[in-house]
Amino acid sequence: MESKAMAIQTKDEGGIRVRLGILGTALLLLGTVACGGDAEAGPQGAGEGFERTINVEVAPVETSSFTELIRVTGTTRAYQDVTVSAEEVGVIRELPVERGNLVQEGQPIARIDDRVLRAQVEEVRAQSELARERWERRQRLFEEDGVGTEMAYLEARYEAERSQASLRSLEERLDRTVIRAPISGVLDEREVEIGSMVSSGTPVARIVRMDPVKVRGGIPERFAEDVRRGSSARVTFDVLDEAPVESEVTYVGSTVDPRNRTFEVELVIPNSGRVIKPEMVANVEIVRQRHEDALVVPQDALVRVEDGYVAFVAEEEDGRTVARSRPLTLGPAQRNLVVVRSGLEPGDQLIVVGQSQVADRDRIRVVEVREPVRDRVADRGGEG
């Protein structure tokens, strides 16, 4: 019995040793995988551990131009928006232009019944002709023959002038019975119908000039020194499949709105197809500053650290390619691009993929060299 028990114990110990051997092999394989599928043995061999090698992609750092922009949301306005009112009393007899049609400056858009005024004009015109003839006769008699008194002479003269002034006044009133477009544009609203009674000041129609249009937006007060008349700008509309429109600032507000701490700017852009409508939302980009020969890098290539940002570059060291950390001083940023004021030099191989996996002096393998950063800036229009 004792020898049988010892045999069983020996058998169990052997099984445990086998299982421990299998477990050790598995742990060794797991450690190899954890170091990365492309890990390479260190110079002392596998007996003293492994040195990891991380695959990265780099892009050469080069200088380029960089445009710093101020982005705001604006709204469009008609270039001119005029409400046309009647200037005479009467009944609307004719509306020759339909709503939505184009009108030219001076074109009739409504006519008021003018029969009473026309009769008055004819009456005063006759009186004016009589007064003029009386004055001319008095003038000849007094100046050439010395007949009559000076008072009669002056009365005839003033009566002729008064009659002529009354005629001009009535003719002006008669002309105002034809309501004309004060600007060229679209007859957007018609406020009266045929048969409507109007008086001086009654709104008759609304005319808007749609080409060009104005774009207005509010600029934060911190940019007060950077925006002025003539500043370059670009306008786009999310709801329109149109190319960006280049323009410039035509108006800069003199005061700051206390509600939102912004000041108003205005731009004028063409609208030949009249597809841009008043009150549309516009995306406005105003050039704040242009930087020449700047070092511009992708913002997502930087790594955030406790005291700012660092970038990793690929360098050769003792026959190996390693990652080196560079603390950075940054400038303005735009659309995932940022200006580096210090920390990088032209020609540096910036790690743009894999930078979050490396530490200073880690061994790396460059698997792809991307296009220079300056070319990426140019592809985006040079404006971030």
Image: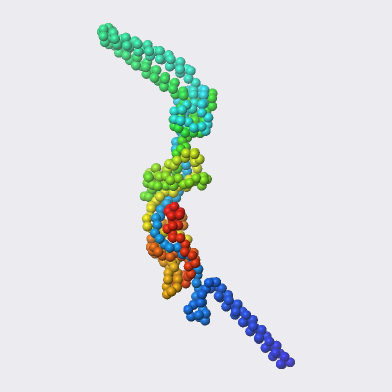
Identify which residue, 103 or 80, lies in the foreground: 103
> How far across and how far down the image is residue 160, in percent?
35, 14
> How far across and how far down the image is residue 45, in percent?
50, 80
Residue 246: quadrant of the picture? top left
> How far across and how far down the image is residue 373, in percent?
44, 59
Q: Is residue 108 above or below residue 54?
A: above
Residue 79: quadrant of the picture? top left
Residue 87: quadrant of the picture? top left
- For image coordinates 46% across by 23% down, the residue present is 177
> How far across and how far down the image is residue 46, in percent?
52, 80
Q: Is residue 114 above or below residue 9?
A: above
What sort of colour scheme is used for the picture? rainbow
- The quadrant the N terminus occupies is bottom right
The answer to whether residue 190 is visible is yes
Question: Going by the image, does 330 lie left or right of 96?
Answer: left
- For image coordinates 39% across by 63% down, the residue present is 346
Identify which residue, 80 or 357, lies in the foreground: 357
How many numbered discs sit on the rendered protein?
A: 0
Question: Going by the image, does 330 lie left or right of 31?
Answer: left
The answer to whether residue 356 is visible is no
- For image coordinates 33% across by 15% down, the residue present is 158
Identify which residue, 220 or 115, lies in the foreground: 115
Q: Is residue 134 above or below residue 336?
A: above
Q: Is residue 357 above or below residue 243?
A: below
- For image coordinates 48% across by 18% down, the residue present is 115
